Image (cartoon, rainbow, N blue to C red):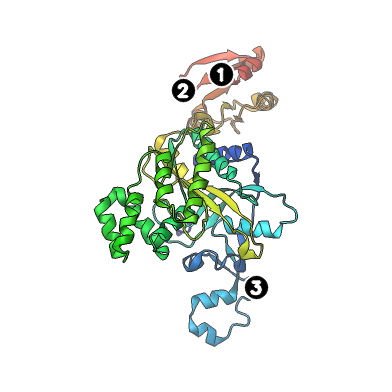
Amino acid sequence: MQKPSIPKGTRDFSPVEMAKRNYIFNTIRDVYHLYGFQQIETPAMENLSTLMGKYGDEGDKLLFKILNSGDSLAGITDEELLERNPLKFAARVCEKGLRYDLTVPFARFVVQHRNELSFPFKRYQIQPVWRADRPQKGRYREFYQCDGDVVGSDSLLNEVELIQIMDEVYQRFGIRVSIKMNNRKILSGIAEIIGEADKIVDITVAIDKLDKIGLENVNAELRSKELSEEAIAKLQPIIQLSGTNREKIAVLKEVLAGSETGLRGVAELEFIFDRVDLLTVKAELELDLTLARGLNYYTGAIFEVKALDVQIGSITGGGRYDNLTGVFGMDGVSGVGISFGADRIFDVLNQLELYPEDSLLTTQLMFVNFGEKEEAYLLPLVASVRAAGIRTEIYPEPVKMKKQMGYADAKKIPFVALVGESEMTEGKINLKNMITGEQKPVTVQELIEAFK
């Protein structure tokens, strides 16, 4: 018989891994609640009309499409089948698809339920998404996103709060991070000033390589993208921007003096830095002009979080978008959001061994089973120990002691309770510490106190 397997790019999670993942989700959930965010869920599948055309051509190809149930070939001619055009065929026989991210379903949710929601609407969502991508290390076909968004408010206080949320989450995890920030309007202003508005992507991609390839090579790359010498000269102070966030802002104000859009972006960043200065944010906050994120999507502030002690891509990202719901016919709803990369955070916590002991909620105490009489005595006792909040098991059958102890070891249960004839007579429990091996008789009350 063939061994069972799962699709490429998907994973099983063991009890230990699930305990770790729940620690991540619960930490993020608690922090979102602290800031007044409310949880929603949307279906795993959406109508393809909701998903198609929202992620660009590449995204459309990566959507998992679901074959219509029933006779999906009804109404398809032999000619159409012989054409062998997969995209055209899918359009005829698939009406639904698995969601590709949480943002488009969220936009649909807001438009569909706009009369029931009060704005600004602060929502968070922790659910899996699916992409028909080529699986590779760190890239999966099924993975979780943990998104938080505020829609229906233009206030930059929302950006400030999202910085606090990111900082609080990573403080709780014990991960040292740098929060990198930029503003889409500054990038547009730079391209405007140097007269190369359509080259903004080329410019940011080149600037981004400064620390890897050096100034000369960055300028060479800009030339290869057919930027004029004059434009490259104007870019120099921007490429070499360094110093504190305040010093960078001062330089940008001068360089972007001729661009209204650019100056608006600088003012927005300055507002955010001013407010964050009033708070105690542990993470380092850095204005990083090479930060672009999905350029066509964002319209204002953009964020990215990097872990300082582990080599890994960004572990959180997000930004301000001006027209989330426009594609569904509801214009002018501005929003700002972030997304925690749960799978990458999982890897970082593993590498740095930062999971707290009590996050792996295993059984704390196991009662050994000596036989029917003892079992009858133990059942109400075990119930009272559980009622005190102690995670407790009783071994289900009176097999050899070695087997029962082996089970406790395999499950890493720290304490084992032994109750035989003499213990029942005295109303005591023999409590064994599985790590040190020491045993001592205790009453039920003493046992409960010991765990508290």
**Residue 20 visible in the displayed image:** no
Which residue position is annotated with label 3? Answer: 70
Look at discs 1 and 2 and give the one toward the viewer: 2
306 or 189, nearer to the observer: 189
Residue type at mark 2 is Ile
120 or 101, nearer to the observer: 120
Secondary structure, mark 1, is strand
Which residue position is annotated with label 2? Answer: 435
Look at the numbered discs 3 and 1 and tell me whether their residues touch, using CB distance below 8 Å.
no
Q: Position of residue 179 (x, y in %)?
A: 45, 41
Q: Position of residue 396 (x, y in %)?
A: 60, 33
Residue shown at the point (59%, 49%) measured from the top left? 149
Look at the numbered discs 3 and 2 and tell me whether their residues touch, using CB distance below 8 Å.
no
On residue 382, the disc is none
Residue type at mark 3 is Gly
Residue type at mark 1 is Leu
Which residue position is annotated with label 1? Answer: 431
346 or 389, nearer to the observer: 346
Which comes before the other along the chain, label 3 or label 2?
3
Residue furthest top as drawn: 426
Callout 2: 10 Å neighbours few (<14), some, many (20+)?
Answer: few
* 334 displayed left or right of 143: right
Secondary structure, mark 3, is loop
Callout 3: 10 Å neighbours few (<14), some, many (20+)?
Answer: few
